[in-house]
Image (tube, helix red, strand yellow):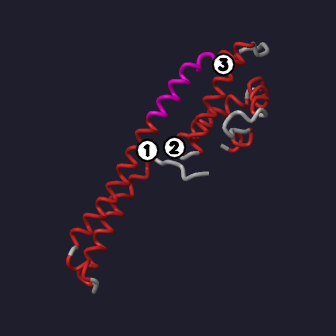
């Protein structure tokens, strides 16, 4: 699995830049290489530009995550009432309820795919997967979900992923 995006990644950028600037400054004093002695501000600027690039990249990832988060939550909000009805229903699943569940399973699979590709924060994935396990633990939904997962059409989402998530 790829390194998963974390909203907390930005915390280390200022410290890493400060350390790099201090090391560059020390190198300009103690290093025999002429480039450190003649161009310390240029080197510190290059280091600063590198960390600015990393931070900008993190901001773009955060915006992408935010867009995904709102999209997925909006989709879930549209299904929530129907899913609640299915859980509290005493009857066998109807064709319409199965359609709703397939929509929910597809949403879960999309979330898992973006988590696996590193675009979903680990804490968010843990929360979402806890909700998935609640639905999966319902006997009607769980049995239908197991049957659906056997089709291998859910981007790698599997019973074992649901169990250990």
Nearest the viewer among 146 and 52 is: 52
Residue highlighted by disc 2:
119
Count neighbours of disc 1 (C-alpha within 10 A) and say few if under 14, some if 14 to 19, many if 20 or more. some
Q: Which residues are magenta?
A: 67-83
Farthest bottom residue in view: 32
In the rendered image, residue 7, in percent from the top left (x then y), is placed at 44, 46
Task: Tell me which numbered mark, 1 or 2, is placed earlier along the sequence.
Answer: 1
Q: Which type of secondary structure does the marked residue at label 1 adopt? A: helix
Instruction: State which quadrant residue 62 falls in.
Output: top left
Residue highlighted by disc 3:
100
Query: Quick check: is 161 in the magenta stretch?
Result: no
Nearest the viewer among 78 and 56 is: 56
Nearest the viewer among 140 and 66 is: 66
Query: Which residue: 54% across, 24% down?
Result: 75
In the rendered image, residue 123, in percent from the top left (x then y), is placed at 53, 43
Are the residues flagged by discs 1 and 2 in contact, CB closer than 8 Å? Answer: yes
Q: How many marks?
A: 3
């Amino acid at each position: 699995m790829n390194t998963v995006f974390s909203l907390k990644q930005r915390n280390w950028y200022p410290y890493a830049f400060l350390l790099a600037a201090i090391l560059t400054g020390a190198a300009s004093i103690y290093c025999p290489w002429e480039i450190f002695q003649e161009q310390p501000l240029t080197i510190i600027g290059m280091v600063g530009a590198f960390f600015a690039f990393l931070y900008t990249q993190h901001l773009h990832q955060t915006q992408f995550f935010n867009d995904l988060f709102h999209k997925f939550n909006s989709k879930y909000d549209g299904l929530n009432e129907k899913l609640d009805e299915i859980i509290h229903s005493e009857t066998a699943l109807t064709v319409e309820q199965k359609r709703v569940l397939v929509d929910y399973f597809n949403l879960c699979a999309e979330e898992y795919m973006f988590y696996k590709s590193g675009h979903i924060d680990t804490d968010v994935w843990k929360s979402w997967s806890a909700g998935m396990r609640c639905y999966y633990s319902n006997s009607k939904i769980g049995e239908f979900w197991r049957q659906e997962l056997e089709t291998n059409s859910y981007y790698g989402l599997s019973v074992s992923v649901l169990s250990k998530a």
